[in-house]
Amino acid sequence: MLRVALKDLMAHKRRLVTTGIAIILGIAFLTGTQLLSGLLNDSIESLIGDVYEGIDAVVRSPNAQDLGFGSPLRSPVDAAVVDATRQVEGVRVAEGMVEGGAAQLIGGDGKVVGGGFGPPTVTYNWIDDAQLRLGTQNSGRGPLSETEMNLDFKSAQDGGYKLGDEVRVLGPDGERQYTLVGTVGLGKEGNKFSGANVMFFTTPQAQMLSRLPGGFSYVVAAADRGVTQEQLATRLSKALPSEQVLTGAAFTKESQGQISQFVDILTTFVTVFGVIALVVATFIIYNTFSIIVTQRTRETALLRAVGAKRRQVLLATIMEAVVVGLVASALGLAFGYLLALGLKSALGPLLTIQGGIPPLTPGIVVLALSLGLGVTLLSAFVPAWRSTRVPPVAAMGELSIDRSGVSRARLLGGALVFAIGVGLIVLGLAQLGLEPLYEAGAGALLVLISVAVIIGPLLAAPAGRGLSRLMGPNVTSRLAGENAARNPKRTAATAAALTVGVTVVTLIAVLASSIKASVYDQVSKSIDADFVVTTTGFNFGNGIPTTLAGQVAGLPGVDVSTAVRFAPLRLTDAYSRKNADAPKDAAAAGATKIFGAGDKAPPGDDEFALGVDPATIFKVFDLGSLQGDPADLTAGTLAMDAKTAEEHGWKLGSKVPVYFAQTGPQDLTLRLIFERPLFRNKIFLPLATFEPNVQPFLNIDNSIYIKTTADADKKVLRKQLNDLVGDNPTVVVQDVKEYIDTQTAPFDTFLNVVYALLALAIIIALIGIANTLSLSILERTRELGLLRAVGMRRGQLRAMVRKEAAIVAVFGTLMGLVIGMAFAYVLSIVIAADNPGLLTFTPPWLQLVLITLFAALAGIVAAWIPARRASRLDVLAAISSE
């Protein structure tokens, strides 16, 4: 049977090659991202290891708040801690380290270097000791005065600066200029860069720019010769029992893990689309083997008649699938490797990536081969097994009846799969299972499969005939509809591949549109302002110069203006502790050995609070009815929305236990309850409460909202506001519509990325349509010859095949639209239940119509080669074919 399998494989090589493309693309996507992820993580570990190589111990505050992304927010340490560290036995040298992100580097072209969502800009103080310094001097010298600075060499290149130039830096009080006296890099030669934009200043300047007056982010120490890191950390913890101490190795490992989180998130995001591509490929392979097995029914019957057993016939088909799966997986692995190399080259200008080629680990090879082979075998087994059930006599006499209907067993099995899928989705959305995300994803996949098994075949015939009528009352349209309807299971399976991709596109498009519409509605209804001065992009800790708010308030034509700040706090009452995630204390998790004090943050629910001026905030924003008086919002008080207060059982006058990373636990008095949150922010802190409890680098205005007088000339006022902002590239003046558009713009960017990634799945689905049509044309060779014989022209035959492809594509797209909108509707209900006002179901109708039209056009394009091949059939040869 091996010889039979190989001969069958060679006889259908063209069909199986196009089938293998689906597996190749899916495996390439998965392995390419896995290879790149491993390479990036290795590079990051190497770079971070170089940065902290000379540090033997780190002393830092135990007051921390982990918000789930990046480094936890910690309160600074005093200069006294630095002095105390230096006195401990075994410490060769100790220095306070300033590490801040509030300042921004302005390039020679006047634009922010790495601004917006680009690489972060980090401010450090210059440390003379080469072992503790974060970087290697590769030109010039370190800064000696408050007007001098160093840059990492890559940022200097990107900004267009060379030694001796005046460098523009935006700090919390506006722009300053510093003389560039040196550059640094990573590694022993100082020729590597991390991707971040790094600036070095004298300690007082770094503290001022990072808003850490007199304080330090942490203390770094190097040990005397013969003293180990463990010994040094133990001594420091005894001398400084109220501080947290880590060995240099533990601090390095922790930093590597925090940065690697972002690589893992990106890899997971892209891997999802690779999985979607493989799911789409499964439908295509199933369809291809179904047609191939059907076409050689008589051949199979002859094998059975001459003594071949069912097991042997099944094994022959499975062996074909094994060969296709292995070859396609190997090619997918090769293309994935090339993809990783291409992505490495593209990321080279952004990050120093280890030299050489991505390591092809055994795990990645096994992943590629097992996934490709598994998907192919899974898809080919059912049609192969079904072919062995046809009696030989019936097959040789072509007595087998069209089995395209849905049997009772198939109907019950599909219904069971559908019910299980819905149940898993409910468990996932309700977060009742062990892995809610995976449960919901598996449930959605089962629902899609059940639709392809039951609903698709039931709808294929009427949908095919109905769609053909929309294409005009001519013979080619009618025949195209009948061709699509004659084998509904095949049509449904072909369309299902496209259904999967369109479902995901529709789900994401509807959710993004709904969130955008909700944000637009909420902001437009809440804000009663004419202009907004705000920051561009997202620079955590970087805001508007502190002097600007007062200048804006004094402009003629300004009725009222209010500045808003934001910072995290943690609610620590019993209700919040009950609903909080598991504590992320590094020592408790066993990830890092900590000496001295552990993280002191109590469990609770993290929220972002707004720092506001009670006298003006409610004049610019309409938040519904108020309980209490804004004038009562003084030091030690807070305000919150009615729903949050009700959930926690708080009333006016209640004590609200909170935790700040800067000052620790606090009991604040609830003095005001407003009806609706502001941009989903549920808690307001008057500046008298905000300023003493929040880290200094967050004590800066993020936006200023301006309401004009009735007789104000808005054009003149806007010009005055722009004059105040000057040439600051991080601050802009916008009217309310521009402001709302800016707030919703990230959704459009996200959608564009998703659409680009999902294009892979849709391309694979279109390959499936072309492949099915090619096989179908071979299957209908005699029929097509008869049509040509009775007068159908070549152009009509091509039109018929293209219309059939368009019918299948539109049918699959419509199913995907319906399923995607159903999923989006369910998700919108769940999200709205936990986050009122965040999402109101708002489908983007125009986009959905365009998706449908695009699918039809893509189906026609996919059918171009099969239609051309059909029109070139020799009439006499086709009629005489069997």
Image (cartoon, rainbow, N blue to C red):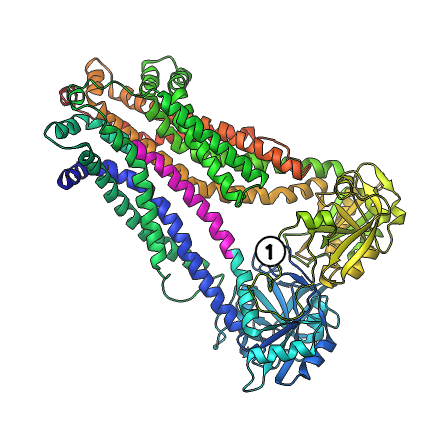
Quarter occupied by residue 384: top left
Quadrant in the rendering for residue 66: bottom right
Name the residue: 21% across, 27% down: 295
User: In the picture shown, does residue 442 fall above or below 728?
Assistant: above
Q: Quadrant of residue 432?
A: top right
Residue 43 placement, left or right of 642: left
On the image, numbered disc 1 is attached to which residue? 69
Task: Give how far across and how far down residue 275 sits, in percent.
Answer: 42, 43
Magenta segment, principal secondary structure?
helix
Does 629 sit above or below residue 365?
above
Label 1 sits on a secondary structure element that is loop
Q: Which residues are magenta?
A: 263-287
Q: Could you say which is closer to the camera, residue 66 or residue 871?
A: 66
Q: Position of residue 569 (x, y in %)?
A: 72, 54
> Picture coordinates of residue 174 (x, y %)?
73, 62
> Tag 1: residue type?
Phe
